[in-house]
Structure formats: C-alpha cells, structure tokens
Amino acid sequence: MTLESPAEAVETVKLLSRASELYHVTTFVGYRENQRGQTKRVTITVWDAGPLKPDIRYRVLARDEDGHEALGRPHDRLDAALAVVQWSDLDK
C-alpha cells in the first residue's frame, strides 16, 4: 500500500487502527529572538487532523529550549493557526 498524501495517511491509519482522533505531525526547529534579545532554539509542532475535520484541522505548539510553551487555538488554515499562537509566552 502506498499513501499519496498526509491526509490520506491520517484517514487510512485512523480507519485501520480504529483510532477516534489522529493527527499527522510535522516538526520544525529553528531559532527565535525573545523580547530580551536572547536567541533561543524553538521547536514548532504542527498537528494536522486532515481535511475531514476542517474546523479544527491545524493546531500549533511551540516550545523553546527552556521549556516555555506557546499554543494557539485550532483553525481550518495553517496560516491562521500560526497567527493565533501566543508567541509572547516564549518571552517569559
């Protein structure tokens, strides 16, 4: 079996595993300067529930090297999910 897209993978794994909720997770790692001028490593995790859950498709969690976390509300578009992340929580 081959899977053509992450959305197809989510639905196939969900069906075969009988999971009630499942996400395709993508992780980005980079560096972010906080309000104090310190550069911190940050890991940004994007959770994608697939197109069959449009209202809550994307969730974003960011965590810096000190363990501070920033979370946003679920959204139907990735850019909107990123825009509502409370990035200032990483500046604490």
Image: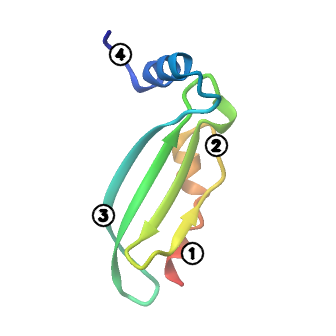
Q: CA distance from mark 1 to mark 4?
A: 37 Å
In the rendered image, residue 50, in percent from the top left (x then y), is placed at: 54, 28
> Which of pointers 3 and 4 indicates the residue nearer the eye?
4
- Of marks 2 and 1, which one's residue comes earlier in the chain? 2
User: How many other residues sit within 10 Å of disc 3, few (<14), some (14-19) or many (≥20)?
Assistant: few
The residue that label 4 is drawn on is: 3
* As drawn, 18 above or below 34: above
* Secondary structure type for disc 4: loop
Q: CA distance from mark 3 to mark 2?
A: 23 Å
The C terminus: image quadrant: bottom right
The secondary structure type at the circle numbered 1 is helix
Relative height, residue 37 to residue 22 (above, below): below
Q: Secondary structure at mark 3?
A: strand
Mark 1 residue type: Asp
Residue depicted at x 55% and y 66%: 70
Q: Residue furthest bottom?
A: 36
Residue type at tag 2 = His
Q: Which residue is mark 3?
A: 30
Which residue is at the far front? 17
Q: Nearer the viewer, mark 1 or mark 4?
A: 4
What's the mark number on residue 75?
2
Marks 3/4: CA–CA distance:
29 Å
Q: How is the image coloured?
A: rainbow
Q: Earlier in the sequence, mark 1 or mark 4?
A: 4
Percent of width and height locating residue 55: 69, 34
